[in-house]
Image (cartoon, helix red, strand yellow):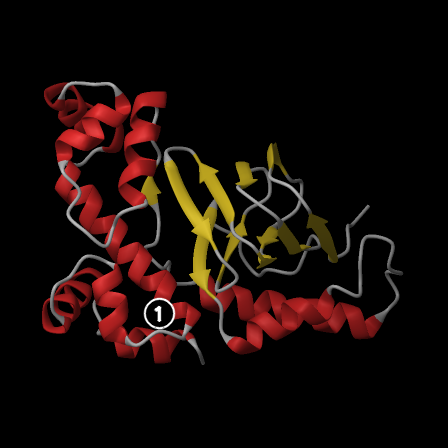
């Protein structure tokens, strides 16, 4: 029996963590708070400016570190013209965000004969597929050991400054040499490369939020000048910070 598209809306008043696979293509979205999404060895932060389109059967782990609101969608069997890739994370346009919030009125108990709802879900699937067609590189490699998790969390707290590597080693209770090896072994990149990528991902998050000036975003991401930030961002994202912000807001 064919399934129909429906919304999943839930308010989490406290941190949560789940791991599962859905039997439907799934749009994961936090309309409030931040979700942390793990798939395989990759990790994404999903603030309200970003969503994930996940293929049915993909095993995901989702958690929040505080209160959050899920405003997600499980799509019916024939909403997409072609099979989805396992996961695509993308910045939401204002239109897509409003469409997601609108469909929250049609939850799992909705009648399959509601043609207004059916048409709206088809339109949302089309918009989401278009946005997800080109993946927004916002993932970070996921730590595989408790010690690396501590080091990464400590570093992410201080992306606005060049944190001393020795302090990371001390926090993770490892020697500097061992920690350096673990960056390569677990994350597939050096400490400096990981920090740079984390700064670029953070910059994308802040640009999507659409509030802070580009100069302030550069400073918050550890760059001493606006010009150095713009140059680094263009190399990473293929566009300037301003163009990225405008392009994702359409």
Identify the element where label 1 is drawn: helix
Examine the rendered structure and indicate whether residue 8 appears above or below residue 66. Answer: below
Q: Is residue 103 above or below residue 181?
A: below
Q: Quadrant of residue 136?
A: bottom left
Is the N terminus in the top left, top right, bottom left or bottom right quadrant? top right
- Quarter occupied by residue 202: bottom left
Q: Nearer the viewer, residue 37 or 121?
A: 37
Drawn side of residue 76 relative to residue 187, left or right = right
The percent position of residue 142, horizontal first and vertical second, equals 35, 34
User: Is 38 left, or right, of 247 in this rendering?
Assistant: right
User: Which residue bears the numbered disc 1?
Assistant: 207
Q: Residue at x 56, y 72 (%)?
A: 96
Q: Is residue 178 above or below residue 155?
A: above
Q: Position of residue 249 (x, y in %)?
A: 44, 77
Q: Residue at x 45, y 53 (%)?
A: 88
Q: Can residue 145 be spotted in the picture? A: no
Q: Residue at x 35, y 75 (%)?
A: 245
Label 1, residues with CA under 10 Å away: few <14, some 14-19, many ≥20: many
Left or right position of 106 against 23: right
Quarter where residue 187 is shown: top left
Please indicate, yes or no, whether residue 31 appears anywhere in the rendered image. Answer: yes
Q: Nearer the viewer, residue 202 or 76?
A: 202
- Numbered marks: total: 1
Q: Quadrant of the C terminus?
A: bottom left
Left or right of 177 in this view: 105: right
Question: Which x, y percent locates residue 219?
Answer: 21, 64
Q: Nearer the viewer, residue 176 or 51?
A: 176
């Amino acid at each position: 029996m064919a399934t129909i598209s429906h919304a999943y809306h839930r308010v989490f008043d406290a941190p949560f963590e789940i791991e599962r696979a859905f039997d439907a293509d799934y749009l994961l979205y936090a309309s409030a708070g931040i979700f942390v999404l793990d798939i395989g060895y990759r990790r994404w932060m999903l603030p309200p400016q970003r969503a994930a389109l996940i293929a049915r059967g993909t095993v995901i782990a989702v958690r929040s570190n505080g209160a959050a609101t899920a405003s997600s969608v499980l799509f019916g069997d024939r909403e997409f013209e072609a099979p989805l890739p396992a996961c695509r994370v993308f910045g939401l346009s204002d239109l897509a965000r409003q469409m997601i919030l609108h469909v929250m009125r049609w939850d799992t108990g909705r009648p399959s004969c509601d043609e207004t709802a059916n048409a709206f879900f088809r339109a949302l699937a089309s918009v989401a597929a278009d946005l997800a067609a080109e993946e927004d590189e916002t993932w970070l490699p996921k730590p595989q050991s408790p010690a690396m998790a501590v080091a990464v969390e400590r570093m992410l707290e201080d992306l606005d400054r060049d944190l001393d590597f020795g302090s990371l080693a001390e926090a993770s209770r490892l020697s500097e040499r061992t920690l350096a090896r673990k960056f390569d072994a677990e994350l597939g990149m050096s400490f400096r490369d990981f920090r740079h990528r984390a700064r670029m991902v953070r910059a994308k998050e802040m640009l999507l939020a659409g509030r802070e000036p580009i100069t302030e975003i550069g400073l918050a991401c550890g760059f001493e000048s606006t010009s150095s930030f713009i140059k680094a961002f263009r190399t990473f994202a293929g566009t300037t910070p301003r163009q990225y912000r405008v392009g994702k807001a359409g």
